[in-house]
Amino acid sequence: MITVLSGGTGTPKLLQGLKRVVNNEELAVIVNTGEDTWIGDLYLSPDVDTVLYTLADLINEETWYGVKEDTFYTHEQLKNLGFDEVLRIGDKDRALKMHKTYYLKRGHKLSEVVDMEKVALGIKAKVIPMTDDRVETKILAKVDGKVDLLKFHDFWVKRKGDVEVLDVIYENSLYAKPCEKAVEAIKNSDLVIIGPSNPITSIGPILSLNGIKELLKDKKVVVVSPIVGNSAVSGPAGKLMKAKGYDVSVKGIYEFYKDIVDVLVIDNVDKEIAKEIPCEVLITNTIMKTLDDKVRLAKNIIEFCGSL
């Protein structure tokens, strides 16, 4: 059994490789829900949906959000009616979000609804939201000279991350419980892979849940660095790592995960730093531009860890 901790961009690329080289029925993906939110009456679980679409071969690879070749008639009509959604939601993508909203409003747990959706989409792997409780990632930032606590979508979608970040907070994570299926997946795993997602806002919320780090300390944990050289491959990881006091480098990634990491996967660009990392290091190409790149990285990781 291989369990992957995932956010919504870097790790899904790795999942495209993993699904082609391992038995999907022995693959579990625990997904960040810290960016879940409501837009109007619609519930959004963006990272969960991205993982579902990725495993179903439906993901829009230009945006790593939504369905490929989707249409946007409903979004445009809502705008004409004066309701301007912060996020541009496609019509097929909206259907999945409507499905979640319908069942959540009727008392179903998010994990139960995601189970329905993964079956409907023909996905063999387990897709598990990190919690059925509310955890909300918020960005403490200086906006127009004033300190404000921003919802993640306000920070990243509306403002494009163009604010001074002071801190990142996982609201309610002290009280939220991890999904039972997530706990079970980790316990039953031979290998846990933390994908190259933003460590602060994609993986941090998962690790903040009570008991998750303790479970991971007893497992073989591989971390794939989302930092190459001195910058993030994509997204605001660099800015957020600085705000939390971490160096924007593979050394900073090690420091963030040092309590749980057994193997750190770094890019060839950073090979000279490998000797400074006090754990096992796999040096390889971590830039995933093509499907071959994704498959090769997945194979390298599981072969290095003796899981093939």
Image (cartoon, rainbow, N blue to C red):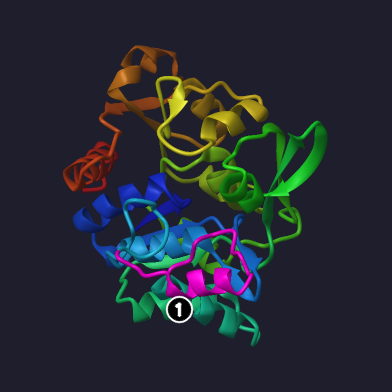
Q: Nearer the viewer, residue 269 or 74?
A: 74
Q: Nearer the viewer, residue 281 or 29?
A: 29
Is residue 192 visible in the rendered image? The answer is no
Residue 282 in magenta? no
Find numbered disc 1 in the image and state the secondary structure of the residue it sits on. Answer: helix
Q: Residue at x 50, y 61 (%)?
A: 88
The quadrant where residue 38 appears:
bottom right
Residue most toward the right?
146
Q: Which residues are magenta?
A: 69-90
In the depicted structure, whether residue 44 falls above or below residue 3: below
Q: Where does the image place residue 290, in percent across and percent down from the top left?
A: 20, 43
Answer left or right for 69 relative to 130.
Answer: left
Q: Residue at x 58, y 45 (%)?
A: 156
Neighbour tally class for label 1: few under 14, some 14-19, many 20 plus, Cα within 10 Å = few
Residue type of the residue flagged with mark 1: Ala
Residue 86 in magenta? yes
Please tell me whether the stretch drawn in magenta is mainly helix, strand or loop.
Answer: loop
The quadrant where residue 119 appears:
bottom left
Disc 1: which residue: 95
Q: Where does the image place residue 272, in percent across and percent down from the top left?
A: 34, 12
Residue most toward the front?
80
Answer left or right for 37 relative to 278.
Answer: right
Q: Where does the image place residue 167, in percent across and percent down from the top left?
A: 72, 35
The quadrant where residue 115 appears:
bottom left
In the depicted structure, whether residue 63 falls above or below residue 226: below
Answer left or right for 16 relative to 30.
Answer: left
Q: Residue at x 53, y 39 (%)?
A: 199
In the depicted structure, whether residue 246 falls above or below residue 105: above
Q: Where does the image place residue 219, in percent across and percent down from the top left?
A: 46, 46
Q: Residue at x 26, y 45 (%)?
A: 298
Q: Nearer the viewer, residue 289 or 200?
A: 289
